[in-house]
Amino acid sequence: MNYIRRTAAAVLFFFLLVGTPSARVQRPEDIAKRKSFGALVDRLSEKAGYFGSDNLVSNELSMLHVLGKLSQMNVTGGAYIGVGPDQNFSYIAQIKPRIAIMVDIRRDALLQHLLFKSIFMMSRNRVEYLSLLFGRPLPRDFRKWNNKTITELVDYVDRTAADEKLVARTHTEIHKRLSGFGVELSERDLETIDDIYRAFHQSGLEVRYTIRDRPTGRFFPAYRELLLEKDLDGRQRNYLAAESDFQVIKTMQDRDLIIPATGDLSGLKAVKAIGDYLHEINEKVSAFYVSNVEFYLVRNGSFDRFVENLRALPINERSVIIRSYFNYAYYTSQHPQTIDNYFSVQLLQTIESLLRDQSAGGYDSYYDLVTRRSLDLRATTP
């Protein structure tokens, strides 16, 4: 993303809008809670790295295809770990973990999750969340929207113009929330969060994944398509498709149970720190969503270090990796589980089987990794 440097006047305007931390009354219990959340974010994080894309939203149209198999395998509770933006929330809404940790090599991902957290905490239901995220006026009868379909919510956002006064008020409230999370944020961090928020309210449901060093291709769906996607049984299962799923995420955000961290999956600190923390709180990993990060780890020669980090995590026989495979560009072979009209393929593998394979000699290639032990999502047995 091209970050906009604020002028001195703009910085002054920001402080006039949100005030200074010392100007706001802070209760002792709020300070303690904030420090605890911020301290955990810091404890689990390591130095950020670079990734050449602005994945404000997912590029995986197939992301819901694993939900049926996750249910069949009784993957539930425990701790959820995931990379990337809000596609994680659809997995969390089904798995209902007791804690979720979002870990991504990009600092921007941590900042985006803080933005999401702010808006979740400001929202009473799905339509208010979408209204605030996209700067659209809230329907007068918004409390009656709890039973609306996701299609009706999408139609509302699409046909409703952004309200700049609402955007300004929401911006102010977001910054107030950010100052209460106990996460140390630089001026550049705040600018980045503003840029992310601007992308949503200016682009609307056309916001999509982009690659910085080449044009965005036809492979990347608009957010609208992601919201309306279905699982393999033909059901709309995005976390915003049902009010009950949204409330699962909101409750976790309100209780500081979705923790963003900056980390390299093959790095020296983050994943092992997550493992240490999960051992301390006696939670096993239910699911680890890695998207297609393993492709880059194999290519960069750091996949072995990732597997060693996996060994530090508390798991059981149902603990799974959720991964994505893309049938284009640098992937030369179509995956056997490819579904017509989908460029991405969502896959499941138990973490135990990956660790056993690695101990027995590992994988011959990335394609071997994503095909050898991938569970059949259509099979009726785990």
Image: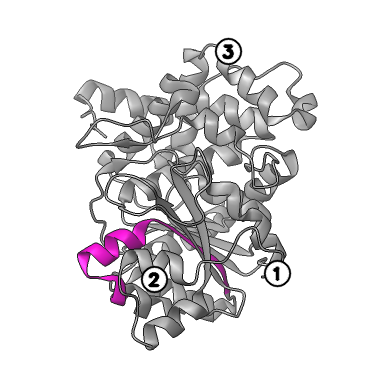
Q: Which residue is mark 1?
A: 381
Q: Amino acid at mark 2?
A: Val
Q: Nearer the viewer, residue 108 or 156?
A: 156
Q: Dividing the picture into quarters, in which one does residue 264 lie?
A: bottom left
Above or below for 235 versus 75: above
Q: Would you say residue 84 is visible in this rendering?
A: yes
Please give the name of the residue rendered at 68% of the width and 68% of the height, measured from the top-left corner. 73
Q: Which mark is residue 160?
A: 3
Residue neighbourhood size for the residue with mark 1, other residues' Cα within 10 Å, grouped as few (<14), some (14–19), many (≥20): few
Relative placement, left or right, of 89 versus 186 is: right
Q: CA distance from mark 3 to mark 2?
A: 42 Å
Q: How is the image coloured?
A: one colour
Coordinates of residue 143 in the picture (x, y in percent): 77, 27
Please give the name of the residue rendered at 23% of the width and 31% of the height, measured from the top-left corner. 2
Q: CA distance from mark 3 to mark 1?
A: 45 Å
Q: Amino acid at mark 1?
A: Thr
Q: Which residue is mark 2?
A: 271
Q: Is residue 143 magenta?
A: no
Q: Dividing the picture into quarters, in which one does residue 129 lie?
A: top right
Relative placement, left or right, of 137 versus 170 is: right
Q: Would you say residue 312 is visible in this rendering?
A: no
Q: Amino acid at mark 3?
A: Thr
